[in-house]
Amino acid sequence: MKVLVINAGSSSLKYQLFDMDKEEVLAKGNCDRIGIDGVFSYKAASKGIALEYDFAFPNHTVAANKVLETLADPEVGVISDISEIGAAGHRIVHGGSFFMEATLVDSDEVIEKIEACKTLAPLHAMPNAAGIRACREAMPNIPHVAVFDTAFHSTMPDVAKTYALPRDLCEKYSIKRYGAHGTSHKYVSQKTAEFLGKKPEDLKMVTLHLGNGSSITAIDKGRCVDTSMGLTPLAGPLMGTRCGSIDPAIVPLLLDNELVQDKETGEMRKMSGSELNALMNKKSGVYAVSGGYSDFRDLESNADKGDEKSALALDMFAYQCKQIMAGYIAILGGVDCIVFTAGIGENGPRTRSKICKGLLEPLGIELDEVANDCKGVARDVTGKNSKVKVLVIPTNEELMIAKETLAVAAL
Ligand code: AMP
């Protein structure tokens, strides 16, 4: 069975075609700069084909059709006809209070509910929905499944997901903790159980998805009980360019006092809420602390050359991750394994080591520095005295979406 996984953003439509019998990627690529001009990329590793060229994408429908045409192209394609595609899975960033699990898109109502989440995911909800509409139009006869980044976290109890704000406001604006990266945390937790030869139901774990965006999740018996991202992905440890959890009083302080130059009138005026939101998402985090570096490779090489600001950014990241991880171990009442994944989690031995440092005595966690000297592979990096397993497990959100799609479409 072949499953097409689609990740539609405001100006891009990324795709991967899986052969699910072998859990193998047949082809993948991106339709970029949709609505601007257009760049198409396509890779079919088994055929040794990698293409990239300009192609006009006025909208997502043209992009979806271009993907299908290429996949079935007699020269570069990997299937002989698009009817070989049995189902499509769509990555959806926010399911709001509507969706607790991956859902079959069998009516316009499902798409309208995804669009209704636009106050919670202003950059993603409409493009995500546009991607589904375009693909349903291009492939009307196959099941389409929406897979939500928030769904895995919907099992969080009230004590973890409620904000201490007036109840009527929380209800009016659907304010609660939804989390994000759920598809990754779910995939990694299942892979961890497989790696250890155990069932997810027999494990308590903390999964650390550490990339440009970072989130940490407490998982008990395969179910999420807490996660560090909140209403939006801004909460949790400081990240590449996101500030992470900060004292909320900083927000009104800046809104009341910080002046910015208005782009249209040139006059100085108070900063708007959306400008502050952009600042907290794009100009903060380790980028702000280090003075302009968000990539951990740059931070590490700067720190090695004596740059104190980069060293502080690295220290703060490990400190905050450690703080959240330790809190979750208390919430779980102990832990069987700590799992690192995503860009930094998979490729950053230094950060893994800093997060686990000094935890043998208080929490029974020790990392083996020799085994830990690895990148991008699934590996047991547990120290010899450790009571808790420490693992590196590469994530694969697209494969998880394809698996969920198969399960929901019951193929
Ligand atoms: P992601 O968002 O999961 O793609 O992660 C991207 C981030 O991973 C980059 O911004 C880097 O900070 C980090 N990263 C990638 N490779 C390495 C590496 N070899 N060492 C340290 N950090 C890395």
Image (cartoon, rainbow, N blue to C red):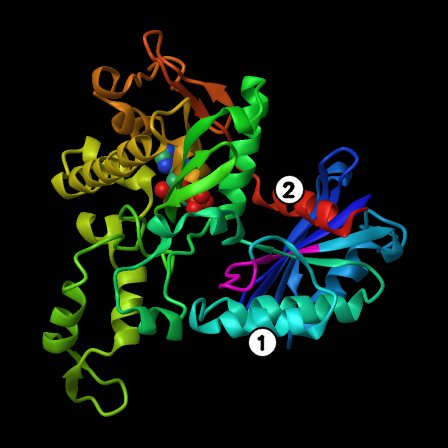
Specify the quadrant that holds the N terminus: top right
- 152 vs 215, left or right, is right
Give the quarter of the image for residue 315.
top left
For marks 2 and 1, give the one nearer the viewer: 2
Q: Is residue 30 visible?
A: yes
Q: Circle 1 is placed at which residue position?
A: 35
Give the camera-side residue of 196 and 97: 97
Ligand 1, image quadrant it occupies: top left
Residue 190 is drawn in which quadrant?
A: top right
Residue 280, magenta (yes or no): no
Q: Where residue 406 appears, x then y in whole percent?
A: 74, 46
Work out whether residue 310 or residue 385 is closer to the camera in this orientation and state it. Answer: 385
Classify residue 320 by image quadrant: top left
Q: Nearer the viewer, residue 320 or 200?
A: 200
Residue 96 colored in magenta in the image: yes
Q: List the residue tagged with mark 2.
A: 399
Residue at image point 62% right, 42% down = 400
Count residues near mark 1 (Cα–Cα under 10 Å), then give few for <14, some for 14-19, many for 20+.
some
Residue neighbourhood size for the residue with mark 2, other residues' Cα within 10 Å, grouped as few (<14), some (14–19), many (≥20): many
Q: What segment is highlighted magenta in the picture?
A: 89-99
